[in-house]
Image (spheres, rainbow, N blue to C red):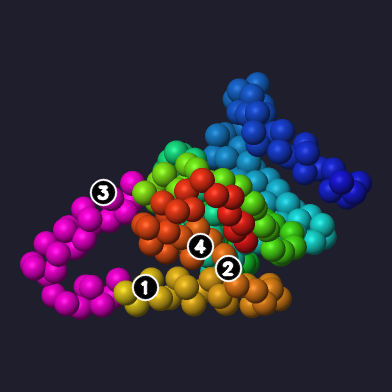
Amino acid sequence: LQESSLWLVDAFDQLSTGGWEQAADRTSGLVSAPGWDGKREALADRFIDGLCALMRRANYRMMSQKEWQFAQAESFMFVMPIDVAWEALDSSLISRLFVRHPHVGLQAAQLSRRVLVFHRGSGIEQRAEWFLEEKLDMAIDTLFTDPARRCYSALCRAVASRATGMERGSRASAHEADAAEVLRGAGIDTQRINLGRLIPSFCLLLRRFFLRLTVQ
């Protein structure tokens, strides 16, 4: 950290450890609670602005909505059984940031307006592994999940209009187009290679179940 940015550490300590509440308790007879809330909110806004400026100086940039959709479409690093409790996170801080800087709100990933994700650089990652757990998941999906999903879709089509099914197809195509655009925007001209492309059928999955595969 540069000397001009060291105040971010003190501001973070005050905002995260309840320093404002302790100060308010010590001076409860002198300062009203709304006054302390306003000062704390102002410090939080100054902190998030300073943090974003610090990340820009370090050549980090904020994850965009298209990059977030690309990560979701590829299930990149989302194999852990984690359920984020978005409602437990405060959304007012990020919402005020987007109001002060509308261009940031238009570019940043809309993670329920509660989280900012920064990254630096874009490149190609390759992994050569057995992917036994992923292959087992694909086998379960092929044998059980996909047939159940097709049956459910057939029931939905029986009671709903054809427009719903067409909308789903166009939404999937839009995910693929956004993924390709993200790679082109990062200056990466390469083909994505995932397990779905390497193992397009169940017979091929059985033949390659105990083979090492390379994805990128």
**Label 4 – label 3 distance at C-alpha:** 21 Å
Q: Classify mark 3: residues with Cα within 10 Å, few (<14), some (14-19) or many (20+).
A: few
Q: Nearer the viewer, mark 4 or mark 3?
A: 4
Q: Residue 112, image x and y in percent?
A: 46, 54
SS assignment at label 4: helix
Q: Earlier in the sequence, mark 3 or mark 2?
A: 3
Q: Residue 197, image x and y in percent?
A: 49, 65
**Label 3 – label 1 distance at C-alpha:** 24 Å
Q: Quadrant of residue 190?
A: bottom right
Specify whether residue 143 is painted magenta.
Answer: yes
Q: Going 54% across and 54% down the picture, which residue do you hit?
A: 76
Q: Nearer the viewer, mark 3 or mark 1?
A: 3
* Mark carried by residue 144: 3
Disc 4 target residue: 198
Q: Residue 83, image x and y in percent?
A: 43, 41
**Label 2 – label 1 distance at C-alpha:** 19 Å
Q: Quadrant of residue 181?
A: bottom right
Residue type of the residue flagged with mark 3: Phe
Q: Which residues are magenta?
A: 140-168
Is residue 123 toward the left or the right of residue 37 in the image? right
Q: Earlier in the sequence, mark 4 or mark 3?
A: 3
Q: Earlier in the sequence, mark 4 or mark 2?
A: 2
Residue type of the residue flagged with mark 1: Arg
Extreme residue in the right direction: 3
Pick whichever, 177 or 136, lies toward us: 136
